[in-house]
Amino acid sequence: MKINWGILVDKFGMDEATKRFEKLALHYVQRNYTEYEWVLTQRTRDNNRDIHLKGYEDGEIPTYLDRWAEAKYKQKSNSLRKKDIDPTILSGLIDGNVELIIFISNGSIPVSLLKRSYLGTHIKNIEVTYILKNQLENWLISNPEIYQEIFDEPINKKIKEKKIINIEYISFDQIYNKAISFSPTTYFRVGNKYVLHIFIYSTYKTSGKIVKGNSSFCFLEDNDNYTDPNQFSILPGINKLSFLILANKPFKGSITYTFNIDNEQYNVNSKRIAISDEKLIQLSYPEQLSFSQDINNMILLHEKINS
């Protein structure tokens, strides 16, 4: 059996259902992000966030509110859409001080929107995470008093927790400079470093490791800035794992990575890629942009000196 989220609308109407779901989201962040003090925003002019840190006076903590949460109630537990995500992310980018955005929803998120949101927030190094239907339901099963408060009835004891692991997608990023390091690529050159991103969805806390990859890439140690492929933690929600890799030798095709999580093996396949050892200079699009800017700056400097 599953939680019937439509009950909230049937019993209280859509406006009250939305308010109750926001209260549920507040309970979630208060109990799972206990290092912060969270409060609901005002319902009008909330700047596209429902929950943020409590502000203090006299320099006790920074006055700007750098951690947000946004609640998205879905009556039929359907997928999130761009209009559910974009306003909050855009507001965070404009704010300039936001470090964390948590989306809490009883729906799901399509991979295309997941990719889009992470690409956008990387511009300002904003961490974004999603608490979705299955892990939210698991949490309510473990906290029946919260369910009672929100739904105004006891939770059905026949509803059981689900342990789910899904590897959502894999991508590679350029490492060229900080301004454009977020640009995905499928073309590589032998001897260059790249970042391998793998997104794993989990309904529970666990750990894992990569047990098989491709000899055309090797993992590099930098545990201070990147994920350790030999042992990493997985938290409830969508986990973004970032590994530092080096292109070793030429290759064309799709790469498969095998994970061991809870003694189960999971495989994820990349898009078709190409690793080249050609000596001719071949610039990727982000590199072209950077070199073009450098050339323009040199021209402007030359004109200024000679004027």
Image (cartoon, rainbow, N blue to C red):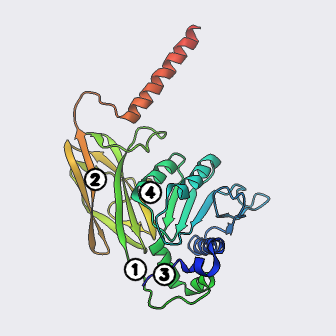
Residue 17's image quarter?
bottom right
Q: Residues within 10 Å of mark 1 (few under 14, many from 20)?
A: few
Residue at disc 3, secondary structure: loop
Question: Residue 170: percent from the left, percent from the top?
Answer: 34, 55
The three-letter code of the residue at mark 1 reads: Lys
Distance, label 2 to label 3, CA atoms, is 35 Å
Q: Amino acid at mark 3?
A: Ile
Secondary structure beneath dot 4 equals helix
| x, y percent for residue 265 | 26, 69
Q: Position of residue 180 (x, y in %)?
A: 45, 39
Task: Please provide percent x and percent y for residue 254.
Answer: 23, 51
Residue 184 lies left or right of residue 63; in this view the side is left
* Residue beneath disc 1: 162
Counting residues from the N terminus, which is met first, the one under dot 2 or under dot 4?
Answer: 4
Q: Name the amino acid, label 4.
A: Leu
Q: Name the residue: 59% across, 83% down.
A: 151
Looking at marks 2 and 3 on the same chain, the residue that comes earlier in the sequence is marked by 3
Quote the CA–CA distance across marks 3 and 4.
24 Å
Marks 1 and 2, the one that precedes in the sequence: 1
Within 10 Å of the Cα at label 3, are there few (<14), some (14-19), or many (20+) other Cα atoms? some
Q: Nearer the viewer, mark 3 or mark 4?
A: 3
What residue does disc 4 label?
Answer: 114
Q: Is residue 265 left or right of residue 64?
A: left
Q: Amino acid at mark 2?
A: Ser
Q: Is 5 drawn above or below residue 238 in the view shown?
A: below
Residue tagged 2: 270
Picture quadrant of residue 287? top left
Please give the name of the residue rendered at 56% of the width and 73% of the height, measured from the top-left corner.
32
Residue 3: image tag: 3
Gap between marks 3 and 1 measured at Cα: 12 Å
